[in-house]
Image (spheres, rainbow, N blue to C red):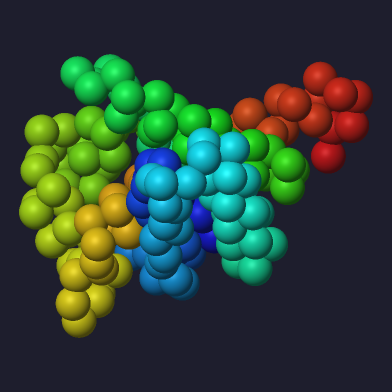
């Protein structure tokens, strides 16, 4: 299974692509950070993010997309940008006809490190180790996106397949 993970952000949006199966180590395919200029108008920033994510989905042809679920933050401005970027990521996957799953930060941390309370350094170290990389993926947004993809391979792959099968049955096309 190939998964494109997205750590949404309006200024920096991490994207990571891995391949794997539940219970086995994943393999790195690629990782990126999509940047937008905070000085640009919001519509232009969202459009750039949409085009970039759409291109990455087309280039890497994932089987599914995993996006970090937006959670409450103290800074309303930050959470709004993150929520807008998250919506663009979900849309990019849905537009390509892919199953899209969202995960909370604690779900990803628990899947990758074994602790839902892990910090950024622990997450980056585990992603580096799990993907057998010679150096940590930088910046942290890229490591977080890879962690989302790993989490989905290990935890969400089965859930997505069941949901897709149920959707096909609902539409009358069981296969």
Q: Tell how many labels.
A: 0
Q: Residue at position x 54%, y 60% from top?
A: 2
124 and 11: which is toward the camera: 11
**Is the N terminus in the top left, top right, bottom left or bottom right quadrant?**
bottom right
Quadrant in the picture for residue 31? bottom left
Answer above or below: position of 28 versus 115. below
Answer above or below: position of 23 versus 170. below
Task: Please state the horizontal and vertical placement of residue 35, each as a whole percent of the image.
Answer: 42, 57
Q: Residue at position x 59%, y 38% from top?
A: 43
18 with respect to 106 (left or right): right
15 and 41: which is toward the camera: 41
118 and 86: which is toward the camera: 86
Q: Residue at position x 64%, y 54% from top?
A: 51
Answer above or below: position of 20 versus 44. below
**Is the C terminus in the top left, top right, bottom left or bottom right quadrant?**
top right
Quadrant in the picture for residue 61? bottom right
Q: Residue at position x 30%, y 53% from top?
A: 141
Task: Please state the horizontal and vertical placement of residue 138, each as a whole percent of the image.
Answer: 24, 66
Task: Please state the horizontal and vertical placement of residue 158, each as a whole percent of the image.
Answer: 52, 39
Task: Please state the horizontal and vertical placement of residue 17, each as a whole percent of the image.
Answer: 47, 62
16 with respect to 90 (left or right): left
The answer to whether residue 101 of the structure is visible from this angle is: no
């Amino acid at each position: 299974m190939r998964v494109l993970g997205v750590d949404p952000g309006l200024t920096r949006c991490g994207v990571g692509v891995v391949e794997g199966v539940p219970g086995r180590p994943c393999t790195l395919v690629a990782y990126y950070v999509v940047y937008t200029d905070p000085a640009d108008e919001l519509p232009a920033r969202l459009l750039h993010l949409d085009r970039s994510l759409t291109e990455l989905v087309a280039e890497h042809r994932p089987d599914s997309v995993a996006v970090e679920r937006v959670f409450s933050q103290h800074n309303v401005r930050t959470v709004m940008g993150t929520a807008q970027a998250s919506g663009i990521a979900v849309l990019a996957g849905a537009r390509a006809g892919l199953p899209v799953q969202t995960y909370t930060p604690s779900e990803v941390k628990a899947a990758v490190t074994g602790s839902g309370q892990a910090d950024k350094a622990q997450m980056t170290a585990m992603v580096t180790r799990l993907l057998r990389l010679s150096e940590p993926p930088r910046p942290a947004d890229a490591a977080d996106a890879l962690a989302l993809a790993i989490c989905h391979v290990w935890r969400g792959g089965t859930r997505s397949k069941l949901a897709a099968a149920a959707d096909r049955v609902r539409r009358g096309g069981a296969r």
